[in-house]
Image (cartoon, coloured by chain):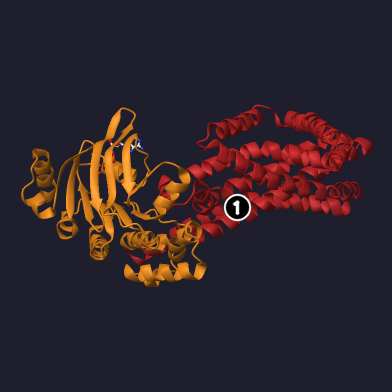
Amino acid sequence: MNTHESMIRMLDVHKTFGSLKAVNGVSLTVRRGQVFVIIGPSGSGKSTLLRCINFLEVPDSGQVWIDGRRVEAEPRRLNAVRANIGMVFQQFNLYPHLTVLENITLAQRIVRRVPGEQAKQTALRQLERVGIAEKAGAYPAQLSGGQQQRVAIARALAQDPDVMLFDEPTSALDPEMIKEVLDVMLSLARTGITMVVVTHEMGFARAAADVVVFMDQGQILEQAPPGQFFARPQHDRTRQFLSQILTR
Amino acid sequence: MNLEESVQMQARFIERRRRTRLSDFPWWILAVGLLAAAVAVLISTDPDFNQAFVIIRAGLGVTVTTSLAAFALALVLGLIAGLGLISANPVYRNAATIYVEIVRGIPMLVLIFFIALVMIPGAVGGINVLGELLVSRGMTAAGTPLAGLDISQVDMNFRAVLALAVTYGAFLAEVFRAGIQSVPGGQMEAARAQGMTYRQAMRFVILPQAVRNILPALGNDFISMIKDSSLVSVLAVRDITQIARLYAGRSFKFEEAFTILAVMYLTITLVLSIVMKRFEQRMRRHEHA
Ligand SMILES: Nc1ncnc2c1ncn2[C@@H]1O[C@H](COP(=O)(O)OP(=O)(O)OP(=O)(O)O)[C@@H](O)[C@H]1O
Ligand SMILES: [Mg+2]
């Protein structure tokens, strides 16, 4: 296994939609085991940036490196890269026609060709880890939002990924369910897996982040450890954004 | 409120409930059932109707097998063309669009003539040329049967199935396309993000959901297929329509022949439609999503 010290490197990444510069020249480095939190106003390009990491959006220009390897749009290699990156979405995106267990075993079986019984054991272990082993036989629609999102996390973890990407994982949840998901993410952060998290949960950022970056209009304006970031934001835009979000 | 008032209210309530129950009753099924019963009585009591029924009934097997075979083939064509319609590859997309648009622009009857009497003979001619080419290259074993294939060996029942399948394949392509597009985009994204190929994502994530969404539409199209299968009588395929036409022409018993024919189609389609409604209700009750 490759043990490159920087797990994710982006070099001058651009992505435009029509004339809109969603990501406008971003470079960043996420080191192995870091929790990298991205914050910023709506429409600032956070999701697009995250999706450029696993090429759900193919950048117009710039480079993306994962664990020392250049990510390219060539399908076979791209699928191998993606299999090594777990992704958790705002809307969960569980497969509604499959049970919780099948949701977690599907990709193991058809992408990594793990034998059925082994895939099932892995799935049950991950469900245990997110605290809902008893729901293995249920369908997603029978679960609460918080439970669904924990299944989605278990599904991503079952890929045994080196990197986990989270795109506002708690934004679609009722307040009383946010904590159960954040708790799972906090304990995950302590295991040393590399995490990139887009969130508006400043409490999570303070508690778990190694680095916080602030994005605005497709660019990273500011980047710092959370203590420094929240105590002494450098840019007016950052201060303005923080004051809005913290008083809300 | 005194006792009398309350009793009156209760009576009104019961009356209203009775009336809604009466208006909810599927009267149309009763009416159709009575019609079918009347025809059944005719068949069992009137010798002319009885004879027409016995003769036309012989075509039921052809009508049913033609419809089933054509629909099965149309499902395959429709799925392939439907995937083509949404393909990112412009070659597939345009090929599928051409197919759908051509079929949509031609009356079904004309299309059936064209496929059975122009396209299939043309294809056989092509196979002959290919066979001769193989023979001239020394591949006699493979070439000879192809070169010797005669259009008269391709029977009309087979051509009818192919003609119906090509026609319905184009309709079903649109149904599959709509079904696939009814699945939220996040599903494909989640599957691709897990490293699945486009094909794997389609097969294991998108299509199972799409097919569930379009089952009612597919059921309706199958019923339409049974009705439209009557058109293949123009190819002299001995389905119930063709037999009824022949019988009526021969015996001049138009009334008997076409009454029986109409009621036969109606019975098949109504039974299927009721079965499908039941099935849909059951699916909805077991819905997970
Ligand atoms: N597929 C797309 N096609 C066209 N425009 C897009 C697409 N995806 C994103 N955009 C636009 O790009 C800009 C950045 O979007 P993005 O979703 O990355 O922002 P965000 O920071 O994640 O916002 P939010 O906090 O609302 O999720 C927005 O103006 C958005 O409308
Ligand atoms: Mg977003």
- Name the residue: 78% across, 32% down: B123
Q: Residue furthest right?
A: B250
Q: Is residue B72 above or below residue A179?
A: above
- Say which of A224 and B64 sits in front: A224
- Say which of B26 and A212 sits in front: A212
Q: Residue furthest left?
A: A232
The hue in which chain A appears in the rendered picture of the protein:
orange
Provide residue A13's location: percent of width, then percent of height. Answer: 29, 38
Crowding at dot 1, Cα within 10 Å, few <14 / some 14-19 / many 20+, comes out as few
- Name the image quarter holding residue B245: top right
Question: Residue at label 1?
Answer: B26
Check the residue under mark 1 and report the chain it is in. B
In-image side of B213 versus B59 (left or right)? left
In-image side of A204 versus A14 (left or right)? left
- Name the residue: 58% across, 49% down: B216
Q: Which chain is red?
A: B
